[in-house]
Image (cartoon, grey):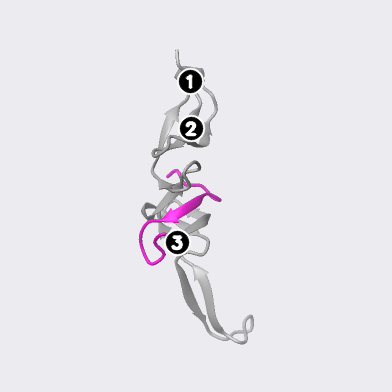
Amino acid sequence: MFIRKDDTVAILAGDDKGKRGKVLLILREEGKVLVEGINKVYKHLKPSKKNPQGGRLSKEMPVAVSNVALIDPQTNTPTRVGIRFTADGTKELYAKKSGATIRQIAKPNAKYAAK
């Protein structure tokens, strides 16, 4: 999974298809991500000591990671991503559409440097 907290992602499927948001939380075991303002539901609360009024609380629910895509920094559109090694042996995440670098994954390693 190449999505990290604070990445901007586009929603590819579901009621919020086409919207964008910032990743708030990654749930690796479930294969889901929590995206700000996406997949909102109402949770009905009974009146209690803590909340004497009760009512409806709006909150975000997790979205399957297969239904989100990272945003290409160069074209500002959703894109698939890949991993490549640069000439100095740095491992980086890049956008498949434009070839733009998204982030560095690993520090330079002479083992993977171009000869």
Distance from disc 3 to disc 1, alpha carbons, whole Å, reads 38 Å
| Residue positioned 51% across, 21% down in the render | 109
Give the tally of numbered discs.
3
Distance from disc 3 to disc 2, alpha carbons, whole Å, reads 27 Å
* Residue 24 or residue 100, whichever sits in front: 100
Q: Is residue 3 magenta?
A: yes
> Counting other residues with Cα less than 10 Å from the Cα at mark 3, is it few (<14), some (14-19), or many (20 or more)?
some
In percent of width and height, residue 58 lies at 52, 74
Q: Is residue 12 left or right of residue 40?
A: left
Distance from disc 2 to disc 1, alpha carbons, whole Å, reads 11 Å
In percent of width and height, residue 32 lies at 42, 56
* Residue 30 or residue 15, whichever sits in front: 15
Q: Residue furthest front?
A: 75
Q: Which residue is mark 2?
A: 92
Q: Is residue 60 magenta?
A: no
Q: Is residue 53 above or below residue 87?
A: below
Place residue 95 in its image quadrant. top left
Magenta stretch, main secondary structure class: loop
In percent of width and height, residue 93 lies at 46, 36
The residue segment tinted magenta is 1-18
| Residue positioned 64% across, 80% down in the render | 50
| Residue positioned 46% across, 44% down in the render | 75
Q: What's under tag 1, amino acid-wise?
A: Ala
| Residue positioned 44% across, 51% down in the render | 28
Q: Which residue is mark 1?
A: 87
> Counting other residues with Cα less than 10 Å from the Cα at mark 1, is it few (<14), some (14-19), or many (20 or more)?
few
Q: What's under tag 3, amino acid-wise?
A: Pro
What secondary structure is marked by label 1?
loop
* Residue 79 or residue 33, whichever sits in front: 79
Question: For residue 62, which numbered disc appears in the image?
Answer: 3
In percent of width and height, residue 89 lies at 49, 22
